[in-house]
Image (cartoon, rainbow, N blue to C red):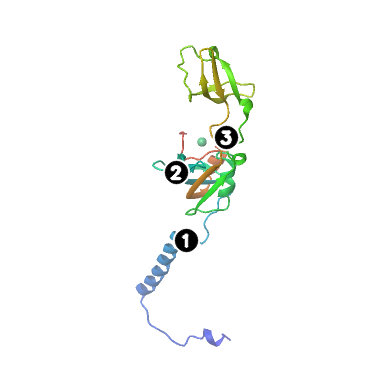
Amino acid sequence: MAPKSLTFAFFRKITLSALLGEWGKVRSDFNRCSASKPLYAMQISQHTVVAIDYTLTDDQGTVLDTSEGREPLYFLQGVGQIISGLEEALEGKTAGQQFSVAIPPEKGYGLRNDSLIQQVPRDRFPADADIEKGMQFRASSPEGPMMVTVTDVSLDFVMVDGNHPLAGQTLNFAVDIVEVREATASELDHGHVHGPGDDHHH
Ligand SMILES: [Zn+2]
């Protein structure tokens, strides 16, 4: 026996088109709902592809870098393509979220290492190089190639700093998460994002 509440007591004649219309309405409501606030939005986790708009400022509020006016930054989460502090802040978040985070040097570009500041004889540089303060060179070192920034130049010597220009700095990021999706098999294989934001072709 069916419970009383499920007994068909009233019948209303409806046409097929009305029925479809009702379904259509339900579906479009669902679409609107899922477009503005997905019920099961993909969370950022290891090996998801993430696109962000961001602005990076130092503690004085000076803009050091921004995606404004450019394509969003695409990267593969969890493989060190971006600094660890930003990966940590993004973990578990979803597309459409905006947030600000202050990342300490240890989780950014590291602490400054004074031993990377060195005086180098001028003749180690190309003879025709017009060396100026602020220029960056690729240098060979016992630990492999590294980037150095010229901090001072004299007739016979050049002072270079092998620290990353943002080492020792707290990095203040304002982030707008644009997209989160699963990585494709070939993206995982290559360890980088294909499609929008791709920097090479296959
Ligand atoms: Zn590739």
User: Which comes sooner in the sequence, label 3 or label 2?
Assistant: 2
Residue 66 position by quadrant: top left
Q: Say if 197 sits above or below 22 in the image.
A: above
Mark 1 Cα-neighbour bin, 10 Å: few <14, some 14–19, many ≥20:
few
| Residue at horizontal 57 percent and vertical 34 percent from the top | 167
Residue 162 position by quadrant: top right
Label 3–label 1 contact, CB within 8 A? no
Of residues 20 and 49, the one nearer the viewer is 49
Q: Which residue is mark 2?
A: 72
Question: Where residue 148 appears, x then y in whole percent?
Answer: 54, 25
Residue 37 badge: 1
Question: Where residue 28 appears, x then y in whole percent?
Answer: 40, 65
Separation of disc 3 and disc 2 at Cα?
24 Å
- Judge whether residue 78 can be spotted in this image: no
Amino acid type, callout 3? Ala
User: Which comes sooner in the sequence, label 3 or label 1?
Assistant: 1
Q: Which residue is mark 3?
A: 167
Question: Where residue 198 appears, x then y in whole percent?
Answer: 46, 38
Which one is in front in this view, the residue at disc 3 or the one at disc 2?
A: 3
> On the rendered structure, is 13 left or right of 59?
left
> On the rendered structure, is 165 left or right of 12?
right
